[in-house]
Image (cartoon, rainbow, N blue to C red):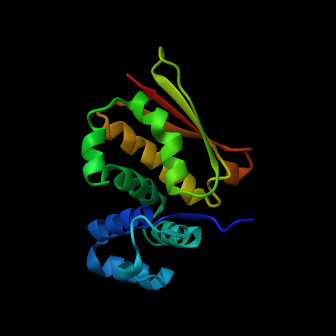
Amino acid sequence: MTERKLKGGVLLGYLDFIKQQWGQDGLDECLKAVQLDIKDIKPDVLYSLEFDEKIMKWISGTKGMEYVRKSGNHTVKNLGSLAYLVSFVNIKHLLKRAKDNYQETFNFGEVSILCDDFSKKAVIIMKDSNLIEESSIAWEGAFEGMMEVTRTKGTVKLNKCQVKGNPYDEFLLDWA
């Protein structure tokens, strides 16, 4: 099996969240714990998923699982100029691009989006995308961030979790 990798921009997003929440000392503590030098991370280069998992485990282990969710939200909402441009589209348009965006950022897993043109609901299914519970929780926060960036009021719920024995992760999005 090919090593699971993700683009450095995701790692930088999580590290930016850590710095904003807990300052340079928190960032330094995390970088030391995960044995990573932030100067070596380039946004468009692929890195081992192991770094992502270690960062999330550090967040959950030292600060709590609620911060893992917040880190996913932060990462989506702070994509620089892309976040600004996304604010001009609606959530359905963004969801239609989500599968392609996922495949451009991660070299593993499958994403399916179930959303018709008439309802204000969506089901997102992610298979073989998350190996630790923290990843699923971060995605829950990321989908909340997508709703916030598109100025969509609603809820996101992790309904099924592959790490907990389900065949895939399932997220339910519901908006007004």
The residue located at (46%, 34%) in the rendering is 95
Residue nearest the observer in this picture, 64 or 163: 163
The residue located at (30%, 48%) in the rendering is 82
Residue 11 in picture, x, y percent from top left: 43, 67
Residue nearest the observer in this picture, 174 or 93: 93
Q: Which quadrant does the N terminus fall into?
A: bottom right
Q: Is residue 29 left or right of residue 22?
A: right
| 169 to 62, vertically: above or below | above
Residue nearest the observer in this picture, 102 or 71: 102
The residue located at (37%, 78%) in the rendering is 38
| 105 to 140, vertically: above or below | below
| 68 to 103, vertically: above or below | below
Q: Is residue 164 left or right of residue 142?
A: right
Residue 145 in picture, x, y percent from top left: 37, 44
Residue 50 in picture, x, y percent from top left: 58, 72
| 16 to 82, vertically: above or below | below
The residue located at (48%, 46%) in the rendering is 101
Count the marks: 0
Q: Is residue 142 left or right of residue 77?
A: right
Residue 107 in picture, x, y percent from top left: 60, 58
